[in-house]
Image (cartoon, grey):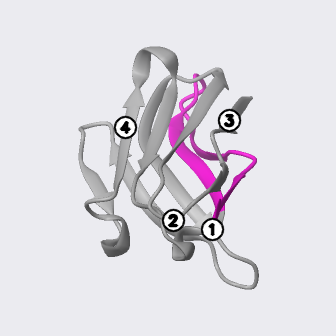
Amino acid sequence: QVQLVESGGGLVQPGGSLRLSCTASGSIADIYVSRWYRQVPGKPRILVASITAAGGIYYIPSAKGRFTISRDNAKNTMYLQMNDLNAEDTAVYYCNLNLLTPDRERKDYWGQGTQVTVSS
């Protein structure tokens, strides 16, 4: 079994920064894609950023130039550096890993979510 533990959320003023972390533990043979999603009440969870094993990176348009996704394979940890935050970034942020288990199964795992609130 794989567990993802997130940290780094909180309350920040507009224009401020936060760095989210997501650390995976358990049996992992390989990680294909690391993703960050966010969700606000009453709306679907949406993809914010992703990074593939080959290093391919995607951001939603509103995150380009402000957010940076990265990973540290040695630590099984992924990050989302968020700068110049605004109220529209307020949401619960979830990490997601698409990975290969030692049993050669490809599976998705989710973190527990961390609240990011941007407010003055």
Q: What x and y, as percent, mark residue 7?
A: 66, 37
Question: Distance between the Cα atoms at labels 4 and 3?
Answer: 16 Å
Q: Which amino acid does label 2 sit on?
A: Pro
Q: Of the residues under marks 4 and 3, which one precedes in the sequence?
A: 3
Q: Give the range drawn in magenta.
A: 92-120
Q: What x and y, as percent, mark residue 21?
A: 56, 36
Q: Are marks 2 and 1 in contact (CB under 8 Å)?
A: yes
- The residue that appears at 41% across and 24% down in the rendered structure is 72
From the image, which quarter does the C terminus lie in?
A: bottom right
Q: Nearer the viewer, mark 1 or mark 3?
A: 1
- The residue that appears at 59% across and 36% down in the rendered structure is 22
**Residue beneath label 1, please?**
120
What kind of element bears circle 4? strand
Question: Distance between the Cα atoms at labels 4 and 1?
Answer: 28 Å
Question: Distance between the Cα atoms at labels 1 and 3?
Answer: 31 Å
Q: Do the residues labelled 1 and 3 touch (CB within 8 Å)?
A: no
Q: Which residue lies furthest to the bottom in this view?
A: 42
Q: What x and y, as percent, mark residue 59?
A: 33, 62
What kind of element bears circle 2? loop
Q: What residue type is labelled 1?
A: Ser
**Residue beneath label 2, please?**
14
Q: Which of marks 4 and 1 is in front?
A: 1
Question: Distance between the Cα atoms at labels 4 and 2?
Answer: 23 Å
- The residue that appears at 44% across and 61% down in the rendered structure is 15
**Residue beneath label 3, please?**
4
